[in-house]
Amino acid sequence: MKRIKKIWDSFSNMGIPDSISTSDKKRILLLNQMAFTSIIFTLLHIFVFSIWNFPNAITIQFIFLLFYFSVLYCTSQNSFKFSKVLFVITLYAHIFILCLLFGETSQMHLLYIPAAVIPIVLYDLKHFRISLSFIFLAIATLVFLYLINFSCFFSLTLSLELLGKMRL
């Protein structure tokens, strides 16, 4: 358990200098924690999708895994503004592609609700326009999914049994 905490702390505190304000430290810490959590969940989904034999989903997960690692790398290089933008766009794009892949019945689009709040947490109130822009991007993407009826050339047809397992 101590080893897991040590790994968590090392990823959480990656690239945080002492010279910045306490509120910025907390936002960077949260960014690192969300990026690391996204990496863990993406790895978990790679394992699950390999069991279910979804090669398209596995490929998509590996691509987004690289982007989540890029967020941590940019943070370690003290590129905090770019890291925040990269994380939010990567998260939104990840959800969007998974929605297209699995369709509306998988209910992946419901992840946009908590994802839309992330910019509010990552940005200071002075950057309200950036947060609001990202929220509108999430809403616009969700509306676009409904307009195209969640269909794409690489969409999968899922059985009802598998849909029940995915929703757990």
Image (cartoon, rainbow, N blue to C red):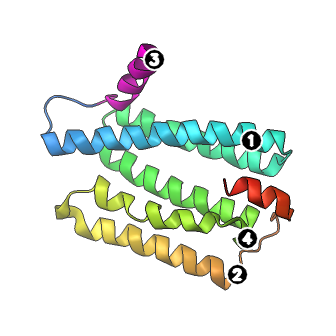
Q: Earlier in the sequence, mark 3 or mark 2?
A: 3
Which residue corresponds to mark 4? 105
Q: Is residue 86 magenta?
A: no
Q: Residue at x 16, y 63 (%)?
A: 126
Quadrant of the rendered structure where residue 78 is?
Answer: top left
Q: CA distance from mark 4 to mark 1?
A: 18 Å
Which residue corresponds to mark 2? 148
Horizontally, residue 85 falls left or right of residue 67, namely left
Vertically, is 74 above or below 128?
A: above
Q: CA distance from mark 3 to mark 2?
A: 46 Å
Q: What's the residue type where badge 3 is placed?
A: Met
Q: Residue at x 49, y 39 (%)?
A: 37
Q: CA distance from mark 1 to mark 2?
A: 27 Å
Q: Earlier in the sequence, mark 3 or mark 4?
A: 3
Q: Secondary structure at mark 3?
A: loop
Vertically, is 135 above or below 53?
A: below
Q: Secondary structure at mark 2?
A: loop
